[in-house]
Image (tube, grey):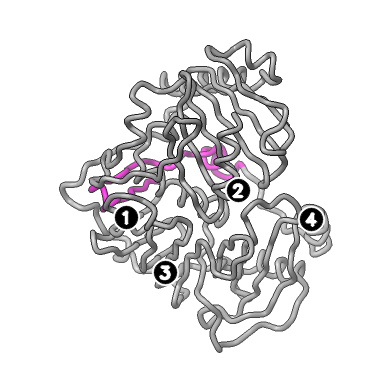
Amino acid sequence: MKYLRTVSTHRLLATLTGLVVAAAGGTAIALAASGSGPVPPRSGLAPALHKALSAPAVTGLSARITFTNNLIDTSAIQGSGLGSDPILTGARGRLWLSSDRLRLELQSANGDAQVLVSKGSFWISDPSSNTVYKGTLPQGKSTAKAGATKPDTLPSIAQIQSDLNRLMGSVNISGATPSDVAGQAAYTVSVSPKHDGGLLGSAELAWDAARGVPLRFAIYARGSNTPVLQLAATDISYGPVPASDFAIRPPLGDKVVKISTTGLGTAAGHAARTKSKAHRSQASVSGVAAVAARLPFTLMAPNRLVGLPRRTVQLLDWAGKPAALVTYGQNLGGVAVIEQSPSPGGAAKSQSSGQGGGSTLSLPTVSIHGVTGQELDTALGTIVRFTRDGVAYTVLGSVPAVAADAAARAL
């Protein structure tokens, strides 16, 4: 969590975009607008999902893709470097996928961002910072012992319908709408929150009706018909992918950063488990009085914040130091406040950027009772960061900037 206070502005923006895509989209491939190709027959959502789950696995696929990012208004960000980052501004590219390999390429004027996953290892090149990240995928218990797992059982249509009925208690789910996505007969479903959705309007997913492959994913802000985020393929083809398509190497001369995802049986793994136990111990402390007693600063946790009732107060382990998480309201329509001791030089770091990114960026500033803070206003939510009287505050929520500013000023 210390990352939020020390990361450069450039990487913060890219990370937020990536988190939204990953959390909402998973590994779905989104395809562009429907065309004039074939459409599948009308079907209920449960039968359509059952057919997708029971479809034989494809041997591979390749696609031309377009990633659109309307999450952040880059005109409000001061400095340079945004125009060359395909994650922040969107880009065209290509994707290849086989049973044990994946390659993703996003093209930009500053060079192509590449992701290669091959037989348990991966590398990611970031042209905006001339950096390559390398690592090995963690090995789960299921892969440690061959044949130790049982095959997944395909749920029946009745079971799928029962699960959908439970989900519809909190979200609106459309039926399976027949559509044509990039020349493939597909079904499209839309999901939207019923209550307290904040700025999130809906998410749409389309999948190949015959093969069950996800084909389209988009996230919409409340009241908008234009996707905030969309990953789109202009065409797609199925079949074995030649090994030569995965035979690429990281750019020569780039800085290499190794990412460790293993070592659970080593001293490092023991330290990680010890830290995890400490984190769970911190997480067990809740309530205003109990949390306040563990903090080296005065906790600000009013009963109500901008009209929202206080819900929870939780102690956090923030890079080994105690911090507090206070939540107000419910679901996506609520606001969260993180309170911690400021990092050494944290204010200066948050004002500057380009740490490894080769760019100079600065978030818009906002005045909180005479203290200058930073504000990141996106189509799906707002983050406000400021330090006052020896306490660093981060206010975030799926709310407009005016609401986040008001919440910050009410502390």
Proximity of marks 2 and 4: CB atoms separated by less than 8 Å: no
- The kind of residue tagged 2 is Val
Bounds of the magenta span?
120-148
Label 1 and label 2: CA atoms lie apart by 24 Å
Q: Nearer the viewer, residue 44 or 66?
A: 66
- Of the residues tagged 3 and 4, which is closer to the observer? 3
- The kind of residue tagged 1 is Leu
**Residue position for label 3:** 66
- Of the residues tagged 2 and 4, which is closer to the observer? 2
Q: Which mark is residue 163?
A: 4
SS at circle 1: helix
Residue at image x 59%, y 32%? 337
Q: Is residue 270 visible?
A: no
Q: Quadrant of residue 135?
A: top left
Q: Earlier in the sequence, mark 1 or mark 3?
A: 3
Label 3 and label 4: CA atoms lie apart by 33 Å
Q: Quadrant of residue 180?
A: bottom right
**Residue position for label 2:** 399
Note whether 50 is above or below 384 in the view shown.
below
Q: Is residue 244 visible?
A: yes
Q: Can you give x and y, in whole percent of width and height, for residue 378 in the image? A: 50, 52
SS at circle 4: helix
Q: Earlier in the sequence, mark 2 or mark 4?
A: 4
- Of the residues tagged 1 and 4, which is closer to the observer? 1
Residue at image x 28%, y 58%? 84
Note whether 217 is above or below 352 in the view shown.
below
Q: Earlier in the sequence, mark 1 or mark 4?
A: 1
- The kind of residue tagged 4 is Asp
Label 1 and label 3: CA atoms lie apart by 18 Å
**Residue position for label 1:** 82
